[in-house]
Image (cartoon, helix red, strand yellow):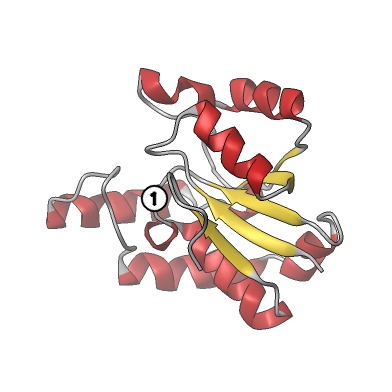
Amino acid sequence: MRTIATIGIYQSSLDDFLDTLRRHRAAMMVDVRQRRGVRGREYAWANSLRLQAALAQAGIPYRHVRELAPTTELRQLQYREDDRLRVGRRSRVELAEEYRRRYLHEVLDQVDLGAILESLPEDAMSALLCVERDARACHRSLIAARLQAQYGVPILNLGPGSRHQR
């Protein structure tokens, strides 16, 4: 049975990130970021080419699924809400309701999630990657919830320093 995990970059080192993926036997990394770079020297390892090289060395295939990424307009909407709430982007714990509603309608309703799911390794775990530490603060939680609701896919939310979060 296919399983989906979600994993973020913030508050992880490359070693911790790879160890988490290995421990959970990730068969594929699915990058759902629009812009595949991360600001800050401590996260340089998560910039696309470096991350792909590290994953290749670890034996974990990488795939970018841009159609699941939020648009620039949606990201800006969330940033404005973060600013209004005085929440740092790296410490956000949940998504703005308007962002959630619009992401579901403008992005998830427009893609064939079944086809994306079928393209993932069978009888294995694939991990959805974005930057936020907590899945609830990131669109990857919306993707995972839709996969679970529509296809019964088991979901694991992987976080730094934890075995897993359901």
Q: Is residue 126 left or right of residue 8?
A: right
Identify residue type, mark 1.
Answer: Arg
Specify the quadrant of the image occupied by residue 17: top right
Residue 57, position in %: x, y?
74, 23
Give the residue at x 51% y 34%. 16
Q: Nearer the viewer, residue 100 or 72?
A: 100
Q: Nearer the viewer, residue 15 or 94?
A: 15
Q: Which residue is mark 1?
A: 75
Give the residue at x 51% y 45%. 130
- The number of numbered discs placed on residues in the rendered structure image is 1
Give the residue at x 61% y 67%. 155
Q: Is residue 75 left or right of residue 26?
A: left
Residue 152, position in %: x, y?
70, 80
Residue 74 visible within the image = yes
Vertical placement of 97 versus 30: above or below? below
Q: Nearer the viewer, residue 72 or 60?
A: 60
Q: Nearer the viewer, residue 152 or 76?
A: 152
Q: Is residue 119 left or right of residue 91?
A: right
Specify the quadrant of the image occupied by residue 107: bottom right
Residue 90, position in %: x, y?
30, 42
